[in-house]
Structure formats: structure tokens, C-alpha cells
Image (cartoon, rainbow, N blue to C red):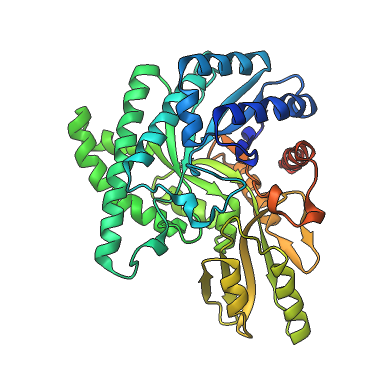
Amino acid sequence: MKTPLGHLGYCTNIHAGETWVDHFAALQQAIPELKQRLSPDQPFGIGLRLSNVASEELEQPENLVAFQRWLAENNCYVFTMNGFPFGGFHNTVVKDQVHTPDWTTEARVEYTKRLFRILSVLLPVDELGNAIQGGVSTSPLSYRHWFEWEQPAARDYIFSQTTQNILEVVAELIKLRRQTDRLMHLDLEPEPDGVIETSDEFIAWFTDYLLPMGIEQLSEQFDLTDEEAEAAICEHVRLCYDVCHFAVGYERPAEVLAKLKNYGLRVGKIQISAALKAEFPADEAGRNAVRQAFEQFNEPTYLHQVVTRTKTGALLRFPDLPDALAAFDDTHNEWRAHYHVPLFVSDYGRLMSTQDDIREVLQLQAERAFTNQLEVETYTWDVLPEKLKLNLVDSIEREIKWVVQNIPD
């Protein structure tokens, strides 16, 4: 749906199912009711998530035409896609396998190219007859704990190999734009323990690997000047600003955006999501009570990385919530946990959400738009503590209404 801040929708990774039949059935069940509640008189935007299997099935002409027909009949449109989870994302242990296959593999390349081919067909045109931009978010190259990360040679290998594969997708995007006039971008999503985890790491990868390798290859492949090749790379590769992920890393939104602007880099979309946080009081009983409150969110499906701020201001990173719980000691001053919690709840008793970071991002977007795509992404409804579980359609409605209500005047 169109808002003063851009296109707004929710990511359909909230729905279980890995085949296109399952995906489509979930959309048919949820979206008409959501549209009636949220956008009865205007087109309703969708952030589409497709597993690899579902993408292969949807690309079949009969399925793609049927989906286009359904979108038109229901006055809905797809403006962004989530290409991070390749395989099973519900009813299975996901953990670090959410990165599998990573960007060292041809399977990740082919999957992502397929998503862009589908998106190029699904993107609607605006009131002036121009196709709107579209993006596909993706993993931050790989999972750093799979490698000997402290070894410079290992880091160089992973960056070189993954960048080469990213550039194969960039070349595809240049070709698709020339063929279809659709401008689409690949949006890398930094997250805790990803090969790209922070805004500084995104910028370093972009300037140290993507630009040098890309300018050399694309200028030759497409007969571009170095300046034209650089512009194409910056246009087709952008940052996915997942608010939860950056909040977990204690990165302030205004500072992240200022750094990106300084390097001429862009945000492809905002994923609107909230994390858990809490400061530890001085007394031992209070500290233990906060730790126990975090323990209620310890579940076995997804990774819930924790970043601790110590009393000296240093940041300690733990690959999952059980690791942080086991390492808890008197030096820990604050915890932030990668656990996507409902946007509309700020207070969890002893714990809080990073809801204020979302408000700040929305305010910055209102002051100077840095993207036109906003996607609500709370995918953890199935694994939330029982008292937080609600009817799924009602929950999605509350999420989107909360965002709309918090759009600055």
C-alpha cells in the first residue's frame, strides 16, 4: 500500500510452506481479508518470500500468469521480495542454515536470478505508466563462523568468491533493465554473525571488493566507462536496512545513513522489525530476574544472537541466546537479542523492545526519503511465548496499523 513514506507491505515469510501451492494457499487465505481491513480502496502491497522450490514452480508460465491474474483481481501488487531463506523456514530447525546455500555457491546465484526474473514480470506500473522499482533482499554473503575468520587469507577468499557471484547477478540486472526497463536492486541484509554484520563492514566490502572487481568486469562486459560501471553497481546493489539487526548491534540509524550517504551508497528497503533489549540493574536479584526473562525467549528454531554492552562500553557478541545465558556475569550492562518481536509491543515486563529505533528510522525517512520500500518483517509468531501468540491475520493487521500510526506528520 502506498504511504507518505513509500510502498508498505508485510513479508510473507511469516507464512509456513515451501512449495508454491503452499505459498499461494497462504496468500489466498490471508491477503484478501488484510486488504479489506487495511487498504479497501487502494492497491495492497506484498513483500513476497519464495523458497527455491516455490520460485522454480512459480516461474512456470501457467503459474505466473495465474498469480498475476489473482493479484489484479484482488488489487494487490508485489514490490519487493525476500531472497534470504533459500529452503525450509518453518517447522524445522533453521539456525545458521538460513545462510545455506551461501553466496559462494552457484545455487544461490541461480535462485536469486530466478527471483529477479519473476519480479520483473510482477512489478506494476505507476499512474504515469512507469514500472516501479523492485528489490530482492539477500543474505550478508555467508555465516562467518563457518570460516577461520581471524585468518586474512580466509576472509579474502570468502569476499572474493562471494563478490564474483554477486557480480553475476548484477550483470543479469543490467540485462533485465535493458530488456524490460525494470530497475531492480539486490539488497544485502547485514545481520549478527553474517560475513557482513555492520554498516562499516558493508561499506568496506562495497569499496574494497565490489567496486574494484565490478568496475573492471562490467566496463568490459557492457562497454561502459569506469564511471558508468560504478553507477550501475551502486544502482543495482544496495543495503537492506533491517531495523532489528542494526539495533542489536547498537548502531544509531542517523549515523548509519550518514555513512552510507558519504560513500554514495543506497538503501534498497527498510525491513521494519523490533528486537529485545534490557539493561541489567545493579542488584543481584534484579540482574538474575532480567536473565530469566530472556530465558523465556530461548527456543530451538532460529538463531537469536546476543550483543552485550559491558560496563566499560565494549561490545561482546554471542552466536545464540544459550551462549549468552551461559556467559552472563557481573560485567554485562545491557543485552540486545536478535529476536523479532511484535512491533506494537514495547514492554515485556523486565524486557523492552527496540521500538524506538523504528520510530527514529520512520522519522528519518520522512525528513529525507532514502528508499521507497518498507516491509514489516516479524516472522517469529509460531515460536513466540504462548501469551504473545495471537491470530495471525489480526497480528499482521496490528503490525501494519502500528507503522501507519507512527508515520510522522
Quadrant showing the N terminus: top right
On the image, the x and y values in percent for residue 60 come to 46, 19
95 sits left or right of 201 in the view: right
Say which quarter of the image contains residue 368.
top right
Q: Residue at x 23, y 45 (%)?
A: 213
Residue at figure coordinates x 31%, y 51% from the top left: 207
Choose between 394 and 400: the one closer to the eye.
394
Where is residue 168, by image quadrant? top left
- What residue occupies the far front of the structure in this picture? 92
Residue situated in front as seen by the camera: 28 or 115: 28
In the image, 113: left or right of 356? left
Image side of residue 20 versus residue 3, left or right: left
Residue 37, quarter of picture: top right
Front position in the image: 122 or 212: 122
Q: Is residue 126 above or below residue 159?
A: above
Q: Where's residue 281, x and y in %?
A: 73, 80
* Residue 1 in view, yes or no: no
Q: Quadrant of the C terminus?
A: top right
Which residue is located at x 39 percent, y 45 percent? 264
Image point 36% across, 34% down: which residue? 110
User: x%, y% of residue 24?
Assistant: 61, 26
Residue 169 in view (yes/no): yes
Figure check: 137 above or below 282: above
Q: Nearer the viewer, residue 250 or 136?
A: 136
Vertical side of 24 occupied by 358: above or below: below
- Count numbered badges in the picture: 0
